[in-house]
Amino acid sequence: MIKTIKQWLNAAADMALPRVCPVCHQALDSDERWLCRQCLAALPRTRYEETDFNTMEQHFAGMVPIERATAYFFYEKGAPYSNILHDIKYHNMPRMGKWLAARAVGDMAGSHFFDTIDAVTAVPLHRSKLAHRGYNQSEYLAEGISETLHIPYVKALKAVRPHSTQTHKGAMERWQNIQGNYALKKNADQLAGKHILLVDDVITTGSTLTVCASLLIQIPNVTVSLFTLAAARLE
C-alpha cells in the first residue's frame, strides 16, 4: 500500500510539473529517476577502468603519481549528454550527479576499480562560488560513491582563492589560472597511509585534478586514484 501511495503521489507530481530526461527531453515515467531508460542504456561509457594504463591514466603520467583513473562517460560540448553536467552544475540538480556516481560504482564493480579505496574526497569549491551556486557538485558525486561503498568521505582540500572560469581557456592558461588556488585542510593528516579517491565532475585538461592530487600525495604514505563523472576525449 505504501508503495502504491508513493507511486500515485509521484504520478500526480509529474502531471503538475512533468519531469523530463535531460538528454532526450522526453517525459520521464514515474519509476524513472533522472534519465529515461533508453538514454541511460545508451550512456557513452568510457570503460577506462577495464584497461590497464588507460587513456586517462596516460594523461597524468609524468605530471602526478596516481594509482588508477577513470571516468563514467564521455563528454562533448553541445552534445545531448553534456546536458547532464550542465544540469548538475548550474540547474540545482546535484542529486542527479550523486545518483549517477552511485550507479557508476555498481556498473564498474566487475573491474574492481574501487576495491582498494579507503576514503573519498572531492575537488573543493571556493566559498564565493559556493555562496553563489549553493552547493559543490563534486561533493555530491563523492558522497554518492562514499555511501555506496560504505567508506568515509573526508573534506581534505580547500579552495583558498577563487579563479576565473576555465571554460574558454587552453591547457596552459588553465594551469596558470589555478596555481596556488588549493591547499590541504588541517584534518587531511587523518588520511595518512590511505588510498584516496579524488572526485570531480569532469576532466578536460586535467589541470585541477593534477594540482589537487599533488597536494594529497604530500600526506604521508598516501596513494591517490581519480574518478570523474565525465571526460572529454583525451586522445
Image: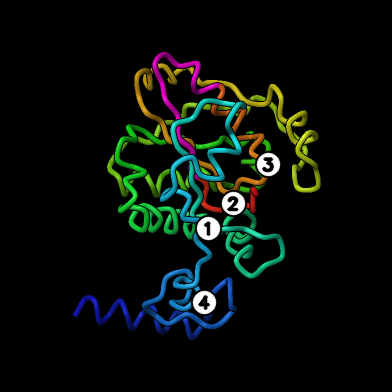
Q: What residue type is labelled 1?
A: Phe
Q: Distance between the residues labelled 2 and 4?
A: 26 Å
Crowd band around label 4 with a 10 angstrom C-alpha radius: few (<14), some (14–19), many (20+): some
Secondary structure under tag 2 reads strand
Q: Do the residues labelled 2 and 3 touch (CB within 8 Å)?
A: no
Q: Quadrant of residue 172?
A: top right
Magenta region includes residue 154: no
Q: Distance between the residues labelled 2 and 1?
A: 6 Å
- The residue carrying mark 3 is 205
Q: Residue 3 in the image: state x and y as whole percent.
A: 24, 77
- The residue carrying mark 4 is 19
- The residue carrying mark 2 is 231
Q: Quadrant of residue 102?
A: bottom left
Q: Where does the magenta region start and end?
A: 215-227
Q: Distance between the residues labelled 4 and 3?
A: 33 Å
Q: Is residue 136 visible in the rendered structure shown here?
A: no
Q: Which amino acid does label 2 sit on?
A: Ala
Q: Which amino acid does label 3 sit on?
A: Thr
Secondary structure under tag 4 reads loop
- The residue carrying mark 1 is 73
Q: Mark 4 or 1, which is nearer the eye?
A: 1
Q: Do the residues labelled 2 and 1 touch (CB within 8 Å)?
A: yes
Q: Mark 2 or 4, which is nearer the eye?
A: 2
